[in-house]
Structure formats: C-alpha cells, structure tokens
Image (tube, rainbow, N blue to C red):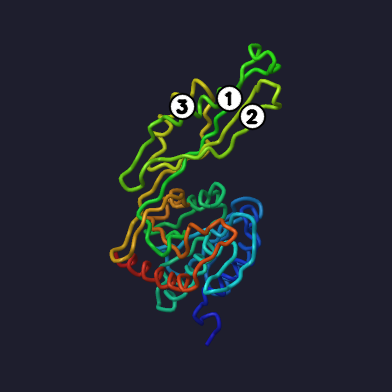
Amino acid sequence: MDPLRAPLDPVALARALIDIDSTTGREGELGSWLAGFLRERGYRVDEQPVSEGRFNVLAMLDAAPLVVLSTHFDCVPPFFPGREERGLLFGRGSCDAKGILAAQVAAAERLRAGGETRIALLFVVGEERGSDGARVANTRAPAGVRYLVNGEPTDNRLGLATRGVLRVRLKARGRAAHSAFPELGESAIDKLLDALMVIRGIQLPDDPILGRTHYNVGLIDGGVAPNVVSSQASAELLFRIVGDAAPVREALGPIEGIVDVEHVLDIPAVRMHTVPGLETAVFPYTTDVPLLDRWGTPLLCGPGSIHVAHTDEEHVAIDELQAAVGLYERLVLELLHL
C-alpha cells in the first residue's frame, strides 16, 4: 500500500506537531512543516500570510468545500515536548489544540478514502492572543462553504454556546504631590479604586444558557513611590460576556466620570449548531468561531479537557483522541447530507 494512502495515525501526527515549538508569535516553523505534510498527501495548500513569518494553512481537495474542519496551531507558553504514559499524551498543545488538529486531518483522510472530497482543513495562528489568524482567514473564505467545525477541548461534546469577551482598560489621571501634603495632589490610585468599587456593585447581564456575566481584574498598575501621591493608575478587566457587549458597555457608564474607559477587545457570545444524538454542553471560554462567521454555520467540538489546557500537565487521553477521528468523520457526513 502507498504509505501516503495508509490510514493516518492521529497519535503519531499529534506527537510530531507537539514537538515543534509554536507558541504564539513563533508559529512559522510548524506552519511550514504542516503545509509540506499536507502537500505531500495531495492537498492543495494555501498559506495565508498573517504577519512576518506567520501564516494560516488552508488545505483543500478537488471539490469546492462545503464543510471545513478547523482549529489553531499556536499554543500558550512555555513550550514542552510530548510524552506518552498511562494512556495519556502529554505536551504543550496536546489538547489545545494540536491533538485536535491531528484528529481532524485523520478524519479528512478517512473521508477522502471513502470518496468524499467536499471538505477542507483550516488551521490558523494567533488564537491564544487576539485571534489575528482568524481575522485574516475570515477575509478569505471560499464561496459556498456551509459549515465550520471548529476544534477546541470539549471532551468530544458538541458546544451549545460559548461566552464572549469584553476587555477594557481603565486609566485614571491625578496630580503628583509629596505625600506629606496630600491636599496639594490628586491621587489617581484613589480614583481607580473608586471606579473598581462601583463596578463591583453593577448589575451585569445574565442568560438562561450561559449564566451571569462575570469579570476578572487581571492587571493593576500605578504610582511611582510610597511617598508620592500618584499621578497615574490603570487596570485591565476581562468580562466573560453572555451575549453582545453593548449592555456591558452601557453598564460601565457610571465610571466614565471617574476614569477613562478604553475598549480593547470585543468578541460576542455565540450559539452553535448541534447534531441530534450527540452529547452537548455549554462552555465558558471564547474561541475563534465569532471571528470566522463567513465560513458557514459553526459547530464546536474536540478531544481533551479545557481544565488541563494551558497547564504544565496538559494532556489528552489517547483513546479520546482516536475517538475524535470518528466523531469528526460522522459530523462531516451528517452535515453534507443536511
């Protein structure tokens, strides 16, 4: 049998992907390896430039694609290589999302072996830090694509919905003075704290499926020394929103007289398509799906648990990874016949 036509081992492919460092901003080496791998197997590969040395990989067969399997191949730092033990595949990206990528390629190979070529593979950079790859891909969607099956760790369940994000930066301005004469100054830190206390009492939107909007004060900065009244202070907050960002923006109105509010990132919550007979769940994280709305109706699923993604023990169960191949194959076949 031609080795390029033999069934693809998703675990071996995942190991090869994991062992190449592709932390966000350093995806070039893996992108080149992946594009070459897919070309060798007969795919038409388009490298979509995103920034210097970084590009998305779109792989197509002979027919115009109706269903696209997609995920990202960048990872959070720090990089660490793969290993197998106790039926688990460890390594950075094992579940988020190189194991998923390997399962999607293996599923596409099964479908092609069965004569189905109306599929494509889209693998993007930058998902972990602003989704610049998805933004570029959304300007280059092939005509006629009907469904996008996006891969993130969902324990092989279909996503009903995911939260969006609203990231804001608060900037307070004051007037420096010697701390022995506070009346001569104006504390920016005090203003920032006042704004944060107001936010703690704000009623935020809720949703019957996704629950209540919550937020995290992730960064605080300000002042120059303990004996100086601060002239500047800032904080960055990330709201996990349950719909559109507009109601949250409106809820922040009362603090605009205290601090400047800069809106840094806005990605809405999303409802996804599901398939009868498959387990579903709601996920509180955000994906590339809202930024790929020109790629058809979205679905979300993939092997692995989000609870171990980004950790120093990131892993995916090998049985679950192999089962994902059949899951993706089934999804594509059902979607092609809807």
Question: Which residue is pictured at 51% across the width and 52% down the height?
Answer: 134
Can I make out residue 145 in this image?
A: no
Q: Answer yes or no: do the residues labelled 2 and 1 have beta carbons within 8 Å?
A: yes
Residue type (three-letter) at the residue carrying disc 3:
Val
Left or right of 136 on screen, residue 281: left
Q: Answer yes or no: do the residues labelled 2 and 3 have beta carbons within 8 Å?
A: no
- Is the residue marked by circle 2 packed among few (<14), some (14-19), or many (20+) residues within 10 Å? some
Q: Tag 2's secondary structure?
A: strand
Q: Nearer the viewer, residue 266 or 335?
A: 266
Residue on which the image places disc 2: 222
Image coordinates for residue 256, horizontal then vertical, percent: 49, 24
Residue 172 image label = 1
Residue 198 image label = 3
Left or right of 137 on screen, residue 280: left
Q: Is residue 216 above or below residue 277?
A: above
For marks 2 and 3, give the CA distance. Answer: 19 Å
Q: Is residue 241 above or below residue 178?
A: below
Question: Which residue is pictured at 61% across the width and 71% down the height?
Answer: 83
Residue 160 image label = none
Q: Is residue 153 above or below residue 286?
A: below
Q: Tag 3's secondary structure?
A: helix
Residue type (three-letter) at the residue carrying disc 2:
Gly
Q: Earlier in the sequence, mark 3 or mark 1?
A: 1
Q: Nearer the viewer, residue 48 or 247?
A: 247
- Is the residue marked by circle 3 packed among few (<14), some (14-19), or many (20+) residues within 10 Å? some
Q: Earlier in the sequence, mark 2 or mark 3?
A: 3
Can I make out residue 260 in this image?
A: yes
For marks 3 and 1, give the CA distance. Answer: 14 Å
Question: Which residue is pictured at 53% across the width and 58% down the height?
Answer: 309
Q: Tag 1's secondary structure?
A: strand
